[in-house]
Image: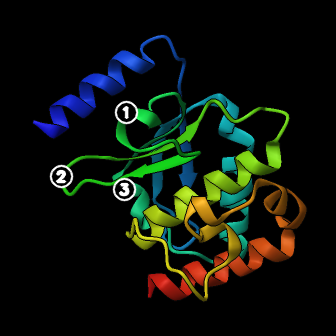
Amino acid sequence: MKRILFALLFVVGTANAQYFTYKVKDWNNNKVYSFEYSPILKQHLDEWFSNAEKMNMEICVLEKLGGVFWSNQITFYTKPSFGLALMFKDSPMLVLVDDNIPTYLPTFINAVLYHELAHLFTKNNRHPKHGVPYILQDGKNIKIENVIKTWNDEAKIEYFQYLKLKMK
């Protein structure tokens, strides 16, 4: 029942949106994965996969990804939040980034997308309290100003090193 409600709310809430298919070739085995995405997130996805390739990340989890969306549906599933990773055993996983984040804050949008993709790749929706990169903490502990000031190439390397460690 919960899945039916989820599907209905998602379809109704996103009926007017335009999505595209994102394709990424796995640099480890040449397999091509594809999922739907909102165009506003494309540059952030391109960057994520470019960095993932540099770090030689395993990306086979993409087989289960249904889409990465700029969405207003997050508040249907959780208290107000900037992003949400929806993971189900027998259904495609979804990553939602709140469309209420101002587009003039691209650094913050980028960090939210990275945060939600970490849930997908570590297959864990929990937020560790210690020993994690700043953007992987629980959202209520993250200050937007700090993310904008500190989300740089060095922080992204730390993020991918952490992901690789947790994916083993």
| Residue beneath disc 2 | 90
Q: Secondary structure at mark 2?
A: loop
Of all residues, the one furthest to the top in this rendering is: 16
Task: State left or right for residue 39 relative to residue 8.
Answer: right
Q: Earlier in the sequence, mark 2 or mark 1?
A: 1
Spatial CA span between label 3 and label 2? 12 Å
Spatial CA span between label 2 and label 1? 21 Å
CB under 8 Å between callouts 2 and 1?
A: no
Residue name at image x 58 percent, y 86 percent: 130
Residue name at image x 37 percent, y 33 percent: 76
- Which quadrant does the N terminus fall into? top left
Q: Secondary structure at mark 3?
A: helix
- Residue 61, which numbered label? none
| Residue beneath disc 3 | 63
Neighbourhood count class around disc 2 (C-alpha, 10 Å): few under 14, some 14–19, many 20 upward = few
Q: Which amino acid does the dot numbered 2 rest on?
A: Asp
In the rendered image, the vertical position of residue 164 relative to residue 148, given as above or below: below
Neighbourhood count class around disc 1 (C-alpha, 10 Å): few under 14, some 14–19, many 20 upward = few
Of all residues, the one furthest to the right in this rendering is: 149
Q: Earlier in the sequence, mark 3 or mark 2?
A: 3
Which of pointers 3 and 2 indicates the residue nearer the eye?
2
